Image: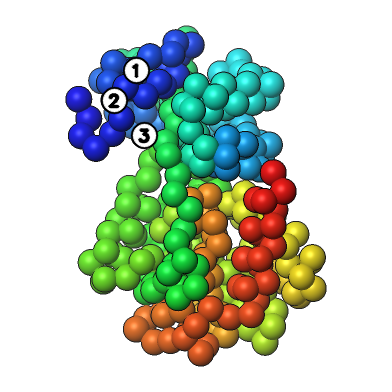
C-alpha cells in the first residue's frame, strides 16, 4: 500500500480501470529503467477540464519528439481525460497522464515491438490560498544544469527534483534558473518578469518547457492592455525587476515578492500581477 494516497481510487493502466493499490507494472518498464517516457497534467475545475486541448497537443508533441506511437487519437485522449474525471467524482482535480516506451530487456536502443505503457490517474487539487495569492512567494537564483531538450515533458525529472530541493534547503518556495546568464524557468514552472510596465517572457525554445499557461498569459496581457515581449532576459534584469511571477497548472499564477533575500519591487504583489490574476480567475469562472 502507498502511504498518504487513496489506494482505492480508480486509475487507468493499459486499457484497464483498476484500484491504484492494485496497479502494477514490470520492473523492466523503460520508464522505470531509463526514464524513457513523457507525461502531462490536465487541471479541472468543478469537473471541467481547463485548457485541455493545449495539454493534449503538448502530450502529442512530446510523444512525437521521443518517437513513441501509442495509436491513440486526440479523441481517445480527450475521452480518457473526461472519463477519468467522471469516475473520480472530484471537482477541482488534476488528471495525470504518463506514457513510457514499454517493457523490454534492458538496452539503450529503442526496442522493437514494445507496447507503450499508458497510465492515468486523478488527484484532488487545492487552488493556491489567499496568502500565496496576495503576499507572494520567495525564490533564489541558481544555474540551470539540465539537459537541452527541456521542451519535452519527460518523466526524467531529476534536474527539476534537484532544483526544487535547492529551494527547500534555502528555505524558499522556488528557484529561478539561469543558463549562460539568461532566465530559463523555475523548478517546474514558467517565470515572468515585469520591467517598466512591460511583461517579459523567455523565448519559446528548447531551453524551457512551454507551459500551457504561457499562451493564456499572453492572451490575458492583451486583454488587460499590458505590453508583452518575448526575448532573452538577463540575470541583471531579473535582479532589478519591478515584478516577478510564476505560472503552472497547479500554481496557476502567483507573484514572487522576495528574490535572493531581497524584496521584488515594493515587496508586494504588483499591478501587472493583479490584472493577470483577475483575468485568470475570470477565465476559470467562465468554464
Do tag 1 and tag 3 residues touch (Cβ < 8 Å)? no
Q: Residue at x 65, y 50 (%)?
A: 284
Please give the name of the residue rendered at 61% of the width and 73% of the height, measured from the top-left corner.
Answer: 273
Question: Which of the 4 image quadrants contains residue 224?
Answer: bottom right
Mark 1–mark 2 CB contact (< 8 Å): yes
Task: Give how far apart the Cα atoms at labels 3 and 2 are.
Answer: 24 Å
SS for dot 1: strand
* Depth order, front residue of 197/232: 197
**In this view, the mark in front (3 or 2):** 2
Q: Earlier in the sequence, mark 1 or mark 2?
A: 2
Cα separation between marks 1 and 2: 6 Å
Occupied quadrant, residue 201: bottom right
For residue 192, the mark is: none
The residue labelled by disc 1 is 19
Give the quarter of the figure containing the N terminus. Answer: top left
Circle 3 sits in a helix, a strand or a loop, which is it? loop
Residue indicated by mark 2: 7
Count of numbered tags: 3
Q: Position of residue 215 (x, y in %)?
A: 69, 54
Q: Earlier in the sequence, mark 3 or mark 2?
A: 2
Amino acid at each position: 500500500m502507498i502511504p498518504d494516497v487513496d489506494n482505492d481510487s480508480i486509475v487507468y493502466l493499459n486499457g484497464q480501470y483498476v484500484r491504484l493499490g492494485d496497479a502494477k507494472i514490470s520492473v523492466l518498464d523503460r520508464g522505470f529503467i531509463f526514464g524513457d517516457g513523457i507525461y502531462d497534467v490536465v487541471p479541472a475545475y468543478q469537473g471541467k477540464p481547463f485548457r485541455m486541448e493545449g495539454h493534449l497537443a503538448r502530450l502529442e508533441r512530446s510523444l512525437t519528439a521521443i518517437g513513441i506511437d501509442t495509436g491513440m487519437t486526440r479523441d481517445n485522449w480527450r475521452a480518457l481525460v473526461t472519463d477519468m474525471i467522471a469516475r473520480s467524482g472530484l471537482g477541482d482535480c488534476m488528471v495525470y497522464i504518463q506514457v513510457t516506451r514499454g517493457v523490454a530487456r534492458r538496452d539503450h536502443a529503442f526496442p522493437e515491438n514494445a507496447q507503450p505503457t499508458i497510465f492515468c490517474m486523478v488527484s484532488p487539487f487545492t487552488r493556491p490560498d489567499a496568502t500565496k495569492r496576495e503576499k507572494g512567494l520567495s525564490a533564489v537564483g541558481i544555474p540551470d544544469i539540465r539537459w537541452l531538450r527541456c521542451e519535452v515533458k519527460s518523466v526524467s525529472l531529476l534536474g527539476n527534483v534537484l532544483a526544487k530541493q535547492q529551494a527547500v534547503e534555502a528555505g524558499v518556495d522556488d528557484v529561478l534558473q539561469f543558463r549562460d546568464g539568461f532566465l530559463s524557468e523555475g523548478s517546474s514552472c514558467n517565470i515572468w518578469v515585469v520591467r517598466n510596465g512591460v511583461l517579459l517572457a523567455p523565448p519559446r525554445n528548447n531551453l524551457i518547457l512551454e507551459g500551457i499557461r504561457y499562451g493564456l498569459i499572453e492572451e490575458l496581457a492583451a486583454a488587460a492592455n499590458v505590453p508583452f515581449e518575448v526575448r532573452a532576459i538577463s540575470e541583471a534584469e531579473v535582479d532589478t525587476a519591478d515584478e516577478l511571477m510564476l505560472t503552472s497548472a497547479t500554481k496557476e499564477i502567483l507573484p514572487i515578492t522576495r528574490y535572493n533575500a531581497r524584496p521584488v519591487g515594493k515587496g508586494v504583489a504588483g499591478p501587472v500581477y493583479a490584472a493577470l490574476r483577475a483575468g485568470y480567475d475570470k477565465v476559470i469562472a467562465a468554464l
